[in-house]
Amino acid sequence: MITRLLAATLAAGLLSTAAYAQETFDLKFQSSDNSGTVSFGVQQEWAKHLSEVSNGRINVEMLPVGSIVEYNETLDAVGSGILDGHITDSSYFTGKDPGFALIGNPVGAYSTPEELRAFFDDGGGTKLYNEILNPYGVQFIGPAAQTAEAIPSKIPIDGVADLKGVKIRAPEGMVQSAFAAAGAAPVNLPQSEVFTSLDKGVIDAADATTLATNDSMGLNDVAKNPIWPGFHSLPLNEVSINKAKWDAMSDEDRQMLTDSVKWYADHLAERVRSRDEEVAEKLRQRGDVTIHSWSEEEKKKFRQIGQEQWKTYAERSENAQKVYDTLTAYLKKEGRL
C-alpha cells in the first residue's frame, strides 16, 4: 500500500511539474513607437521570434503607441495588469520620479547602443532599475537602444558655440535643460509639429529622432544641415513586464524571455544603424544637404554640459541620486566621464 501511495504521489508531482513547465503565456505589450516605423517592425519580429523559440508557449501581441493607453501611462498600465508589458523610453515617467529621467536618457552619457547596454549588463544598471520599477509592479527584462539621435537643422551648427541663440525644439526635462545651458533657446513642441515649425522658421533646429526616421518624416527636406552622427541623446528603450506575470514564469521561461530581449536589442541597433548609413549616403548624393559631424572635442564640451544637468536631477529624489552614483562610478571606471 505504501508503494502504491508513493507511486501516486510521484505521478502527481510529475504531472504538476509538466503542467507548470508547459504553461502558456499570451501577453499584450504596447510600444511607444508608431506602426510603420523601423523600430516597431523589429518589435513585431521580436514577438514572432519569442513565440518560435518557446514553441508557441510565450506569445506577445505588439501594439503601437496609444493603442490601449497614452505613451506616458504604460508604467501604471503594466503594473496594474491592463497591459502585460511595454517597450518604451523610460524617461516618459520622469513625472513620477526624476530617477526615470536619469536612467532613461542621461544626456551625453552614451555614443552607441552598445555603450548603453553595457551599463545595464555590466555596470549595475539592471539591478538598480528593478529596485526602482518593482514597487510599481513592473519587472525590467532588459535594455535596448537605437542609434544616437540626429539633429535636423536649417543652419550650420558645428560645435557648442554655434548653439548660442539657436531656436531648437527640445522635449521638457534634461535634454531641454542641457541645450539651454549650452546657450540655445529651447522651444517645447510635440513631434507632430516639428516639420511645419522648421518649414516656417518657427525653429532653427530640432531634437527629433534618428537620421533615418527624421528623413522619413521629410525633416531633411526643410532642414538641410543635419548634425549626424548624434552626440547628445541616446534614450533607453526598455522592455519590461508585469511583475506578477514574471514571477509566475519558470526560471527557464524567464531566461528565454531575457535572451529574446538581447536578440531584439541586437537587431534593433543593427537595423537602425544600417538605415542611418543608407540615408546618410543618399543625402550626400543629393548635393543640397550638408551633413555636419561634430569633432570629439566639441562632443566632449556638450557632454560636460550635460553632466552638470545630471547633478541637478540627482538632487531631486533618492532614486535619482542612486542612479547618478551608479552611472558616474561606472563611466569613471570605463574612462568615459
Image: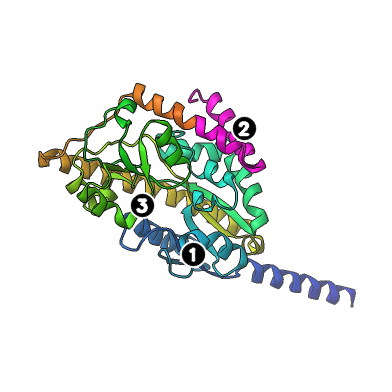
N-terminal of the pair, mark 3 or mark 1, is: 1
Q: Which of 284 and 48 is in front in this view?
A: 284
Q: Residue 189 carries which label?
A: 3
The secondary structure that most of the magenta stretch takes on is: helix
Q: CB under 8 Å between callouts 1 and 2?
A: no
Residue under label 2: 325
Q: Name the residue under label 1.
A: 29
**Res 146 seen here:** yes
Which residue type carries mark 1? Phe
Disc 2 residue type (three-letter)? Asp
Disc 1 crowd rating (10 Å Cα; few below 14, some 14-19, many 20+) is: many
Q: Which amino acid does label 3 sit on?
A: Leu
What's the distance in space between the residues labelled 3 and 2, CA to CA?
32 Å
Residue at screen point 67% across, 41% down:
318
Boundaries of the magenta span: 308-337
Residue at the outermost right position: 2
Q: Which of marks 1 and 2 is nearer the N terminus?
A: 1
**Is 218 left or right of 104, judged from the image as shown?**
left
Instruction: Tell me, yes or no, if residue 147 can be seen here.
Output: no
Quarter occupied by residue 128: top right
Q: Where is residue 204 in the image (x, y as percent from the top left)?
A: 26, 41
Residue 125 placed where, x, y %? 58, 40
In depth, the one of 258 and 185 nearer the eye is: 185
How packed is label 3: few (under 14 Cα within 10 Å), some, or many (20 or more)?
A: some
**Disc 2 element:** helix
Name the secondary structure under disc 3: loop
Whether residues under marks 3 and 1 lie with C-beta atoms below 8 angstroms apart, the answer is no
User: Callout 1: helix, strand or loop?
Assistant: strand
Instruction: Point out residue 287 in the picture as x, y percentages from the top left corner.
Output: 10, 38
